[in-house]
Structure formats: structure tokens, C-alpha cells
Amino acid sequence: MKMTSGQQTSPHFEWLAQNVPAGGTVGVDGNVLGVAAARALNQALGAHDVKLRTDVDLFDAIWPQRPSLPADAIFEHTAPHASVARSEKLAQIRRAVAFHFHAR
């Protein structure tokens, strides 16, 4: 199914539910699927008796020589590499989260 850039809805959830046979399973990487998306996908699939698995690493079987994640310590980017200070970025995120939960 072709998805368009910036698409706000998830028609692929219903497409999967309609095209995966009942009793089938859809696998996704649970590490990159948001909670709301996982709930919506699980609901769409469950209505068609399709199971959702989020406990598999889909690249593991096809990329056996995949490098491990870096173990180096993290560090803060400061100007000129960061466009805003950490405190301002955190304030922006807090405002966005507060707005999202109050807008419901």
C-alpha cells in the first residue's frame, strides 16, 4: 500500500487487517512503534482475528552482520550545532505535551 509523506491517518492499519488472513500475524518492531499506533493497529487487526507481534527484531534475520548500537557516552550539542539551548528545547517539549493532553 502506498503511503504519502506527512499522512495523518493510518489507512495501512485497515489495509493490513483486510489483507492478512484471519488467524495470521503481523510483525512490527515494537521498539519503533509508538504506543498509540500499537493500540490502533492491534485494535484494527484484532477486529479481523489477526494477531500483532511487537516482540521481534525484523532485521535480525536479514542483517546478521548488523553492527551493535554505540556504547559511547552521550553528550550535549551546544551552539552552533544546536539551534536552541537544552533548557528551551525541554520547555518546548513540555508545552507541546501539556497542550496535547489538555486538547483532548
Image: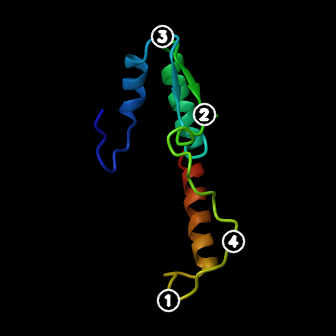
- In front of the other: 87 or 4: 4
Residue type at tag 3: Ala
* SS under mark 1: loop
* SS under mark 4: loop
Is 89 situated above or below 83?
Answer: above
Label 4: few (<14), some (14–19) or many (≥20) C-alpha neighbours in 10 Å: few
* SS under mark 3: loop
Which residue position holds label 4? 72
Q: Nearer the viewer, mark 4 or mark 3?
A: 4
Label 1: few (<14), some (14–19) or many (≥20) C-alpha neighbours in 10 Å: few
Mark 4 or 3, nearer chain start: 3
- In front of the other: 94 or 23: 23
> Is 7 placed left or right of 25 in the picture?
left
Mark 2 or 4, nearer chain start: 2
Mark 3 or 1, nearer chain start: 3
Instruction: Determine the residue positioned at 53% across, 81% down.
Output: 84
Which residue position holds label 3? 22
Q: Which mark is residue 54?
A: 2
